[in-house]
Image (spheres, helix red, strand yellow):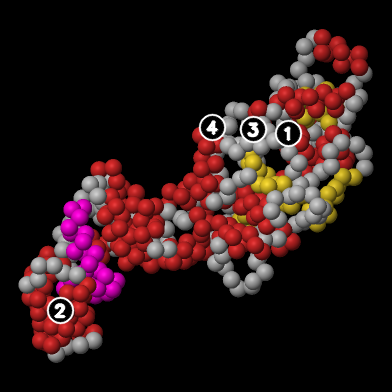
Amino acid sequence: MDMQKPVRVRFAPSPTGFIHVGNVRTALFNWLWAGRLGGTFMLRIEDTDAERSEARYEEQLMEDLRWLGLDWNEGVGRGGDCGPYRQSDRYGIYREYARRLLDEDKAYRCFCSAEELDAVRQEQAAKKETPLYSGKCRHLPQGEVDEKLRAGAPFTLRLRVRPGTVGFDDLVFGRVEIATSMVSDPVLLRSDGSPTYNFCCVIDDALMRITHVIRGDGHLPNTHRQVLAYEALGFAPPRFAHLSTILGPDGQKLSKRHGATSIEEFRRRGYLPEALVNYLALLGWSPATDGEEIFSADEIKAQFDLGRVVKSPAVFDPAKLDWMNRTYINKTPGEVLAKTARPYFEEAGLVADADADPDPAATDAWLGRVIDLVKTHVDHLDQLPAASGVVYGFADAAGGETAVPPEAPLALEDAARAALAPPEARAVAEEFARLAYGRERLDSESYREMLGGVKAATKQKGRNLYHPIRAALTGRDSGPDLERLIAVYEDGARLGLPRKVASCKERLRAFLAML
């Protein structure tokens, strides 16, 4: 690699759908490489597929990149001295270079119809031959070409592939070389005059001074055609690094059948961007520090090296991602998570919509405390409402469910009922309730005082003291720290939430009445 040349890389998606795991891994590795070497990370939009390209997908992919923290230095939405950065705005540039190749006899007009080409492909397939263009129009006499043009015959423009071999040194796969006899003369311009991907890509990368093309290994077959186009145009090709395919746990190419694959869907389900970036960075790349898996984006960038990218397929394991996301959730304070998580609680009817909430800041602060109590039980944020049953009084969902059950009276679980069955346990619960009823306000401090009073009155301690109190307060025999939970109950009851949070006194009366 020429270290004197400033590193310039690009992420060049097509706005034909939501960006998925493979796209983002490509964007991430480009971003990391540019960041590691102090280079430029460019966003270019390859929208030559006019029928499928939509502005909404372009807007979404930019939003997804920003959400992940993969901001770009140059390109669409940023500007720069190599624009325009949408291929649909560069058609004049491509046609100019096409004319140049035609004038230099490095390209030729092909008048073969789609039907003719398809018939040849079918014949080659029947013979188990590699599908290649026959070269029928490669040596048409100029007079015949002129006659077809006067008659208005449609044509494509093809590159004349030179004899010999064509190859490149890939930073991941090593030397890749084939005979040019295995490369069909690639189409540069379609019959409607629109340029093809391989032609646009070469011109854009050359004019935008791209030094490294980092992309998925599905582009390996394209690279030979592109190298030939670089040669014909007189451009020096960039360095190439092709990233291995991402497979699902079943060893098949990752697709929707494996679950969420689009970044939009991961966002909707409440994955944290830091966790996604961390996980995707480890798909096909290994850090120098063996055994470590949790890294910030800056830590990954500091040690990222294309030399440590492997060519064997990477396996996308949803369970591993869930573990990593859970790790990030657990180390993030609830007050930080509350802003992102609040819409899930709103949708479940547990808190008011922020616009209708008379004191959204107080609700967010309380919600942050709720999240801190239950976040160890979730893999992604959309599971938080269903995991908050200990606060709202419904049974927690099992197995990562996200649905919140309909409102119902407080229920005493069988295990809690059993915990309160012994007379001495009942005495503990009733003494705690008596002390609670006599207080105007319950909080962490008063809880500690009451605990001392119950201990003195009943002579119980340890589990025999705490367990009955927990059962009488929560209706459960296990759960979060009671001192924190009592304060959450009391403050939640005062907030006047759309789904009522019962105060400690209400809960004690309800549960003890069920015995």
Q: Is residue 204 left or right of residue 484?
A: right
Q: Secondary structure at mark 1?
A: helix
Task: Sort mark 2 into few (<14), some (14-19) or many (20+) by Cα contacts within 10 Å.
Answer: many
Q: Say whether disc 2 or disc 4 marks the residue closer to the N-terminus.
A: 4
Q: Which residue is mark 4?
A: 55
- Give the residue at x 64% y 71%: 289
- Give the residue at x 74% y 52%: 241
Q: Amino acid at mark 1?
A: Cys
- Whether residue 186 can be seen here: yes
* Rendered position, 272 above or below 435: above
Q: Which residue is mark 2?
A: 450
Which residue appears farthest toward the bottom when viewing the image? 459
Decide whether residue 472 is among the magenta residues: yes
Q: Which residue is mark 1?
A: 200
Horizontal and vertical percent position of residue 331 = 44, 66
Q: Say whether disc 4 or disc 1 marks the residue closer to the N-terminus.
A: 4
Task: Tell me where the magenta segment starts and ends, as one range.
Answer: 471-497
Which residue appears farthest toward the top when viewing the image? 150
Foreground mark, 2 or 4, reads 2
